[in-house]
Image: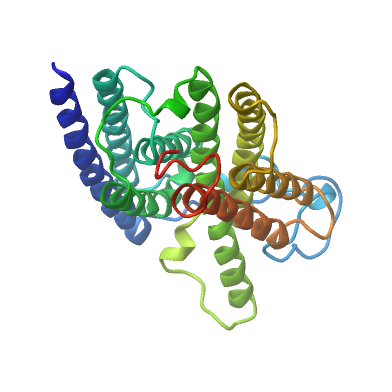
Amino acid sequence: MTPDQLSALSDTLFSVTVAIYAVAVVAFAADLAFGRRPAPRPVAVGSGAGTAPLPGDAVTGDAAIVEGAAEAGPPRRRWGLVGMVLTAAGALAQAGVLLARSLATGRVPWGNMYEFGTAAVLAGVLAFLVFAVRVPVLRGLGLFVLGPVVLGLVLIGLYLYAESGPLIAALRSDWLAVHVSAAILSFGIFIVSAVASALYLVAVRRERLAAGGAERSGGAWSRLPSVEALDRVAHRTAVFGFPIWTFAVIAGAIWAESAWGRFWGWDPKETWAFISWALYAAYLHARTTAGWRGRPAAWINLVAFASLVFNLLFVNLVSTGLHSYGGVS
């Protein structure tokens, strides 16, 4: 195939990806509406007795939840499986978008904002698939992961699309594959972590209201994973993504020294990359610090992800600096 044909194939696969993910959203919505909630079976460890902790409070020591107990229960209905199959098919089509772009241009397929955004979303989808395959109850997150994915891809296609072509001079470096690959992977992982934290906060609030009699339990929301499972997913994905993001920041500094003769110059993108790194470090620290576990830590996680999104969009599209290339990541 010629480069033009490969570029056209990439664009077609992008539309196919959005369509498949949109159908997956419907399947996950049906699963949430009609599926059965896995019955959590928290098991206390040790001899401690007393009342159970309120939702959202940290559980440690004698009140700790046995690993995996919260996910036990009857299997969900087939809609969740349909959503998973469609999500996997969409991920394959999305990988085809990037592969066709790479073959058409003869370079790594993340040389502009359109390609970076597409790759980051794919990383998020793959992270969700890995967790949902290992722990089937986490299919309940599908609607809340794939919904933003579809919206994000639509916005990427409408406002960030760029014709395939060679890299601009500033990006012609072997460090592009290293630095940007790490940034893409960590960003995608942090998407899942942020979704889990957001749902954790919603679940905690609803369970507290239900415990106080202000709101009846049940309904579609009751079919989400337990607050313990959501908190665990948010934490584990952040733990996985943080060292990758750390490596991305370090690799960016090395590339900066090679390109501009200095490792760090407090350029807007560098500054916000450090802010995001510090916020995720604060989240991981808060997650293990008494008084900050639970809801406070979840809020820090969401603020950290918001800083990543701000860095990606504001610096590249609005701010001026050495990292601003008029829409090129």
Decide which of 82, 184 is in the foreground and name it. Answer: 184
Q: Is residue 291 above or below residue 244?
A: below
Whole-percent x and y of residue 77?
33, 48
Residue 226 in view in this figure: no
* Residue at x 60% of width, y 82% of height: 213
* Residue at x 28% of width, y 51% of height: 154
* Residue at x 48% of width, y 45% of height: 138
**Residue 266, image quadrant:** top right
Q: Is residue 256 above or below residue 196?
A: above
**Residue 252, image quadrant:** top right
Whole-percent x and y of residue 136?
46, 40
Whole-percent x and y of residue 44?
75, 49
Decide which of 232, 95 is in the foreground and name it. Answer: 95
Decide which of 130, 71 is in the foreground and name it. Answer: 130
Q: Is residue 60 left or right of residue 17?
A: right
User: Which scheme is used to colour this image of the protein?
Assistant: rainbow
Whole-percent x and y of residue 74?
45, 46
Considering the image in quadrants, where does the C terminus appear? top left
Outermost residue, bottom side: 214
Residue 154 in view in this figure: yes
